[in-house]
Amino acid sequence: MSQNSTLHDAFQDERVHEVWESAYRGNRLLDRFNDVLMDRLLRYLDQPKGARILDAGCGIGDHTLRFARRGFHCTGVDISEPMLDRARERARVEGLEQRVEYTCCGLEKLSFSSGQFDAVHCRGVLMHILRWADALKELCRVLAPNGTIVVIESNASSLEAGIVRVVRMLRKSKSQIIKTPAGIEFHWSEPGQAPLARIANIPFLTKTLQDCGVEPLTRFATEFWDVARFPQGVIRNSTVLFNRAWFGAHLPAFPSCGNALIGRKTTKDPNE
């Protein structure tokens, strides 16, 4: 079985999504922080209400709905049909069905026309894709000329990444660790785990965006620590507040776990 097939099968497993939901959902402080982050992203994306936005790797539609609530037409795409079923139901409950639609496919080969979207949002998704550069190329292909893209990934140069590498070596982690030009990859084979997670080499990611015809506009920290690494309750809530303070103060991106890259697609085809 190919690793692409393994990835596809893994993301049909409800246990993988249950792990993410326990870490990233159901926390009001985190929900409010994500709303504030979305508002900043929209200022950088600089699109009028009604613009066509692609939410790549949308899951159950958290960010898709955030775009829709703010007056945008958003298409969510994900590899997991069970997650998309939940996303559609959430849109129905909120009365946002006219502003959102969902498509099931991998990012490496999107079913959309070139230049179909005014903006693209991809948060914490490329890290789980083996052929991430192909996925990024596709995201840039479906982006309209002068359109804007935001890619949010974990940063291999962060303080957290350094700590994680040391801890995994000391504990003799069951994950296989591979260093590549794109970053540091962690591979798992246990059921209920995402089989691949990559901590990105941000300069390499930026260069790949440029190769796809995207001019970098800015880079900023979205969070200093990954809240999923902290126990629920007071400690996790304190981490969320720390992340929000770091984000709100516009402190440096290079030591931070979460990094956002914003770019604008040039009108010239880089392959010409």
Image (cartoon, rainbow, N blue to C red):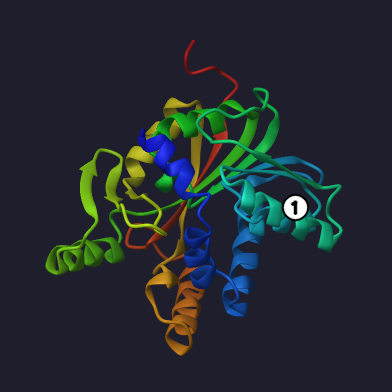
What residue is rendered at 25% in x and 65% in y? 164
Q: Position of residue 266 (x, y in %)?
A: 57, 26
**Vertical placement of residue 42 versus 109, above or below:** below
What residue is rendered at 31% in x and 52% in y? 189
What residue is rendered at 32% in x and 62% in y? 255
Q: Position of residue 152 (x, y in %)?
A: 48, 51
Q: Amino acid at mark 1?
A: Arg
- The single residue placed furthest to the top in the displayed view is 272
**Vertical placement of residue 27 versus 39, above or below:** below
**Vertical placement of residue 217 versus 239, above or below:** above
**Nearer-the-camera pick, 96 or 271:** 96
Left or right, 1 with reference to 262: left
Q: Position of residue 108 (x, y in %)?
A: 50, 31
Quadrant of the frame with the N terminus: top left
Q: Is residue 43 visible?
A: no
Residue 77 location, quadrant: top right
- The single residue placed furthest to the bottom in the displayed view is 234
What residue is rendered at 47% in x and 59% in y? 16
Instruction: Please name the residue that numbered disc 1 is placed on.
Output: 88
**Vertical placement of residue 208 versus 259, above or below:** above
Q: Position of residue 123 (x, y in %)?
A: 52, 51
| Local secondary structure at mark 1 | helix
